[in-house]
Image (tube, grey):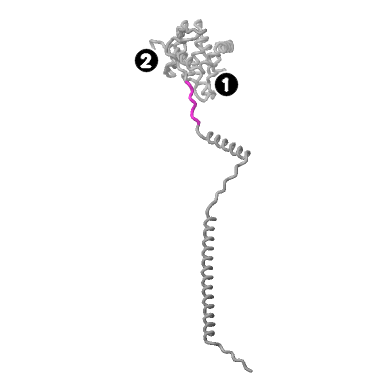
Amino acid sequence: MGTILSISPATKKASIMDAELAVGDGQKNDKSLKRHSMFVSLSWRKLVSNSGKKSAKKVTPNPLPAPANQVAQLNSENIRKTHKTDEKKPKAPIPVPVPTVPTQNKDALVQNGKLSTVQKQPSSLSLVSPRRIVIQASTGELLRCLGDFMCRRCFKLKELKSSDVILWFRNIDRTLLLQGWQDQGFITPANVVFVYLLCEDTIEDSVGTAAELQGTFQTCLYLSYSYMGNEISYPLKPFMIEANKDVFWETALRIIDRLSAKMLQLNSDPHFFTEVFQDLKNQRDTTEANLDR
């Protein structure tokens, strides 16, 4: 027998409506899921961006306290650096108290708790430098002064002239130049002053002959050449003559023994040289000086 399935229209319609409702609910669920997933994704992105900004900021952690040894080492380095900078800086001059000289002649002294005054003695040494004295004279003038001194000292020799003494001096100097014992002349103002120093102490007024005077004078010339000359040594022949041959070395040694200190002083002390220079210049004969004027 056959079975017949019959579906009423209402049932069919209800089933169709149920199916449509199910489909509508499924769509609504899908939309809600989509919206939920959208919200989740947006919130995740915001969370990621905020965490990135926070991580981008610098975070300075609190430093740990340094150990005691390290602190002492840093302090010593700082002290050393400050010393170096202080050494590089220019040091200011240290003020030094300057002693003052009292203007009054009396100074106050305290002795045993009592105030007493002491009178200052005048000092022979002056703080002011001595005045410089300038004396000028030519070589020829000093030679004439030397000749006048010899004539005045040896007054017994009536025929002696000042030109004779100058001639003795110039002949010896010319002979040494011609024979090659010296390259330049010896007669200069300083050397004439040196010769006068020796002659003033050596030549006596008791000389009786011109030959004796010439022998003593040329002995003084030999010592002057040996002491003041430019050469190491000089020959004896121009200086030694028959008149002083026997007493040449005795006279030379006697002059050296007496005048060695003055020879050194003449070259080392300008004041002593000025005194001898002025003394020689004063030996000029006044009558001849007036004729020259």
Q: Residue at x 51, y 10 (%)?
A: 201
Q: Nearer the viewer, residue 216 or 72?
A: 72
Q: Nearer the viewer, residue 256 or 149?
A: 256
Q: Amino acid at mark 1?
A: Ser
Q: Quadrant of the C terminus?
A: top left
Question: Measured from the top left, where is residue 271 in percent x and y?
Answer: 47, 15
Residue 242 visible? The answer is no
Is residue 226 rendered to the left or right of residue 140?
right
Q: Nearer the viewer, residue 29 or 133?
A: 29
**265 versus 178 height, above or below:** above
Question: Measured from the top left, where is residue 230 in percent x and y?
Answer: 53, 23
**6 versus 101 height, above or below:** below
Q: Amino acid at mark 2?
A: Asp
**Label 1 to label 2, Cα distance in Å?**
39 Å
Q: Quadrant of the N terminus?
A: bottom right
Name the residue tied to disc 1: 233
Q: Check if mark 1's residue and mark 2's residue have beta carbons within 8 Å.
A: no
Upstream in the sequence, badge 1 or badge 2?
1
Q: Secondary structure at mark 2?
A: helix
Question: Measured from the top left, where is residue 147 in percent x and y?
Answer: 45, 13
Dot 2 alpha-carbon crowd within 10 angstroms: few under 14, some 14 to 19, many 20 or more: few
**Magenta segment includes 92:** yes
Question: Measured from the top left, where is residue 83 in percent x and y?
Answer: 55, 34
Q: Secondary structure at mark 1?
A: loop
Q: Residue furthest bottom?
A: 1
**187 versus 108 height, above or below:** below
Q: Which mark is residue 79?
A: none
Q: Which mark is residue 292?
A: 2
Q: Residue at x 43, y 16 (%)?
A: 128
Q: Nearer the viewer, residue 268 or 286?
A: 268
Residue 81 visible? The answer is yes
Magenta part of the protein: which range?
91-97
